[in-house]
């Protein structure tokens, strides 16, 4: 968002957290992340464009990279340092 304000949301993940994909026949799909008392749902306009496809692909790529890093941390038995590892493209999914 060049020149605009940006909001930030942090969702602490615990054993009760969940993600859900809901496809529909007559409308665009929903993707939901739930953690604690917070629910975030990704929605699309009725007509999907190339930018929407690119966003969905980036979301999937970054989620896969996140899973790999979480698995690595779990296998190592060490807590995260809280700093990015530098393996990502550095671009946030918008």
Image (spheres, rainbow, N blue to C red):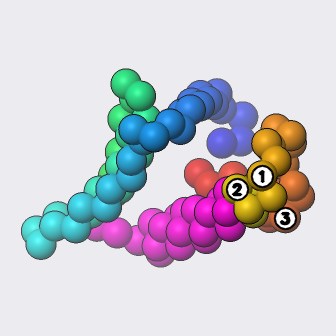
Q: Position of residue 81 (x, y in %)?
A: 86, 40
Residue beneath the point at 34% across and 69% down: 48
Residue beneath the point at 50% across and 36% down: 14
Q: Residues within 10 Å of mark 1 (few under 14, many from 20)?
A: few
Q: What element does badge 3 sit on?
A: loop
Q: How far apart in space, not on screen, are marks 2 and 3 (Cα)?
A: 17 Å
Name the residue carrying label 2.
74
Q: What element does badge 2 sit on?
A: helix
Residue beneath the point at 16% across and 67% down: 24
Q: How far apart in space, not on screen, are marks 3 and 1 (Cα)?
A: 20 Å
Q: Are marks 2 and 1 in contact (CB under 8 Å)?
A: yes
Q: Please, is residue 27 above or below residue 82 in the view?
A: below
Of the image marks 3 and 1, the number of the one nearer the N terminus:
1
Q: Reply yes or no: does residue 59 show up in magenta.
A: yes
Q: Please, is residue 36 above or below residue 71 in the view?
A: above
Q: Are marks 3 and 1 in contact (CB under 8 Å)?
A: no
Residue 47 lies in quadrant: bottom left
Disc ID at residue 89: none
Q: Residues within 10 Å of mark 3 (few under 14, many from 20)?
A: few
Span shown in magenta: 46-71
Name the residue carrying label 3.
87
Of the image marks 2 and 3, the number of the one nearer the N terminus:
2
Q: Residues within 10 Å of mark 2 (few under 14, many from 20)?
A: few
């Amino acid at each position: 968002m060049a020149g605009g304000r940006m909001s930030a949301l942090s969702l602490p993940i615990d054993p009760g957290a969940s993600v859900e994909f809901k496809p529909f026949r007559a409308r665009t799909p929903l993707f939901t992340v739930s953690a604690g008392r917070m629910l975030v749902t990704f929605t699309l306009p009725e007509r999907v464009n190339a930018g929407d496809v690119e966003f969905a692909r980036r979301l999937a790529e970054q989620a896969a990279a996140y899973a790999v890093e979480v698995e690595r941390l779990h296998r190592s038995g060490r807590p995260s340092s809280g700093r990015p590892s530098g393996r990502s493209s550095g671009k946030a999914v918008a």
